[in-house]
Image (cartoon, helix red, strand yellow):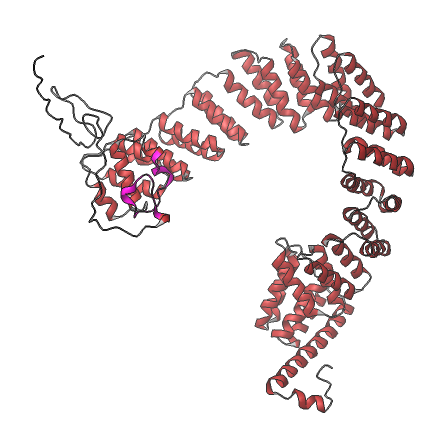
Amino acid sequence: MPPQTPTPPNKFYFYYGHRKPSQNRPTVRGGLFSNRQTLPPPKPKTNKHTHLFQIQKWDPHFLSHSNSPSPSPEASFSASIRLSPIARFIIDAFRKNDYKWGPPVVTELNKLRRVTPTLVAEVLKFQTNPTLAFKFFHWVGKQKGYHHNFASFNAFAYCLNRANHFRAADNLPELMDAQGKPPSEKQFEILLRMHSDAGRGLRVYHVYDKMRNKFGVKPRVFLYNRIMDALVKTGHLDLALSVYGDFREDGLVEESVTFMILIKGLCKAGKIDEMLELLRRMRKKLCKPDVFAYTALVRIMVPEGNLDGCLRVWEEMKRDRVEPDVMAYGTIIGGLAKGGRVLEGYELFKEMKSKGHLIDRAIYGSLVESFVAGNKVGLAFDLLKDLVSSGYRADLGIYNSLIEGLCNMNKVEKAYKLFQVTIQEDLEPDFLTVKPLLFSYAEKKRMEEFHKLLEKMEKLGFSVIDNLSKFFSHLVEKKGPVLALEVFTHLKERGYVSVEIYRVVMDSLHLSGEVEKALSLFDEIKGSDLKPDSSIYNIAILCFVDRSEIKEACACHNKIIEMSCIPSVAAYCCLAKGLCEIGEIDEAMLLVRDCLGNVDSGRMEFKYCLAIIHICKSNDAEKVIDVLNEMMQQGCSLDNVVCSAIIFGMCKYGTIEEARKVFSNLRERKLLMESDTIVYDELLIDHMKKKTADLVISGLKFFGLESKLKSKGCKLLPD
């Protein structure tokens, strides 16, 4: 074998970007080095000064810069691995300087010999900081011999849109035009697509108006369709029609998509005549709509409740000899059934059946539910028989509707048999199944059967107590609290009680004026094994205040606080009014502050009470009257809590004379009766005496004279 000469080692050449190709040196792409080989990382020197390690500044992908802050998502390794070396160098320069533009960043970037528009687009594609992107874009534009191209402008537009600076992105066409790059349709299409995807209809029209009228760029048919579709979807039908006028003015030919966008918008707006006119134009110039288009129109109008429009579209479909399919029939039958026109839907159902269509069970369900709601239970059962004979198995919703219909017709026995059918067919009945039966038994006071049904529910795995709470809410709403109290009395003997049931019954009794019965239930629950919650105490506060038993109401309030709960707004308001009626104004104002501090949606009157107290520091009746006028303009009432706030503020910060001026003004404007003015004047004097006595006692305590006054039997000091 001839001896082999050793091959000389390869030389590595670092280059910035792609080399300029020549005859003897082709273009090299894709690596940091010209021969695509990777050098091992250099070993760290032992004498290098080590920085103090900080975990929040640790960077797992750029370990050579461990003293720099954590990278943002756009500088992560998974993103930078897809960038060119120079783009990675630029992003790393941003990262090392906390993603803030400044002289250090410019110094790093000045190391680059040349920056191309393609490189700018590549950097901006992964940039999410709009300020940094703008600074970089502006700095690159000032480089000698550099000119932005469409790719860099487009990347800048995407970057601004990602950062929600879409208004700045809309100004890019003017910037392009100023730099000698008049924007084309492509640049406007990018902006239109951004606004369309974000649902900004008015911005879509703004960009379109700038595109057509300022820059003279006429959209294609595809872009016109996108503009009109975005305007229709965002509820700007009038603007979409004006764009369609420009479309026709430009001499463009409509596509089927163009017509359908406008037709759908007109259907949703309820403009059926205009829609039919456009439909005739579509039929004349292009083609007639197919069954899918007609079904879409019906589906748009059904949620809007425009059933007449649905039927007119249905007639147009027949006129075009378009055969409706199962989806079209199901859409219009369901809409007519839910809209209270079940007989018209039933006629279409029979027409559908005569044509041999496979009828969906959902159609049966909507018709059965509507027949039951219209007290046509016989027709509903006919549909059930037809459903079973067609090979279907009725679902639980159909049985629930039929059971409710039978109970409404006082045929409880048949309804119970149907309930047993649901059990036999393993349909797992729910509360909606048994609610009509429970209601009928309670209304007829057939409590034995009521209890048997509860036992049946327990065997089926029902949460009986939770369902009874829902049942009592329904019973109170339909029949009032008297019947609910009678049923609850029977249930307590069988042990069916809960705090929620007590709350529902007590609340209904209080609302109907039966305060004594509500409080008797309150005493009953306190003496039972159940523990009242804050809602029970809230209702008790309302009842005690109605009976003018303010101390008991305050005790309930304290119980709520001990439970680490917050009283309801109604309890706060009622208790504050009760305290004001007995002259405890200081305690009432404390409740006002607590309510506003604990409840976000506190009453507006309470907020104005604090404003009145604050304005009383000026001791000016006119300013207080201005606050009262603003309060009444906002729809707030002038109750005793507001008047007590005037007394509290003037006694603490002002004078009796200014307070009397406020009440005199309210009496002259007939906002207060004369008797109320006299009562408030007495409260004002008593409260001022109390405040004066408190000041005297505080002064005596400060100077240490309390013991001498007690020895002389002074009445200023309490026992």
Q: Residue at x 77, y 65 (%)?
A: 550
**Viewer-nearest residue: 20 or 526:** 526
Q: Where, by quadrant of the figure, is residue 673 drawn?
A: bottom right
Q: Position of residue 323 (x, y in %)?
A: 64, 9
Q: Residue at x 53, y 28 (%)?
A: 232
Q: Which residues are magenta?
A: 57-77
Main SS class of the magenta portion in the image: loop
Q: Position of residue 495 (x, y in %)?
A: 84, 45
> In the displayed structure, does residue 552 sit left or right of residue 562?
right
Residue 564 vertical placement versus 231 (above, below):
below
Q: Position of residue 479 (x, y in %)?
A: 85, 41
Q: Where, by quadrant of the figure, is residue 444 drawn?
A: top right
Q: Position of residue 529 (x, y in %)?
A: 80, 52
Q: Quadrant of the C terminus?
A: bottom right
Residue 147 vertical placement versus 715 (above, below):
above
Q: Quadrant of the N terminus?
A: top left
Q: Is residue 64 magenta?
A: yes
**Viewer-nearest residue: 307 or 139:** 139
**Viewer-nearest residue: 589 or 185:** 589
Q: Where, by quadrant of the figure, is residue 107 drawn?
A: top left
Q: Is residue 479 magenta?
A: no
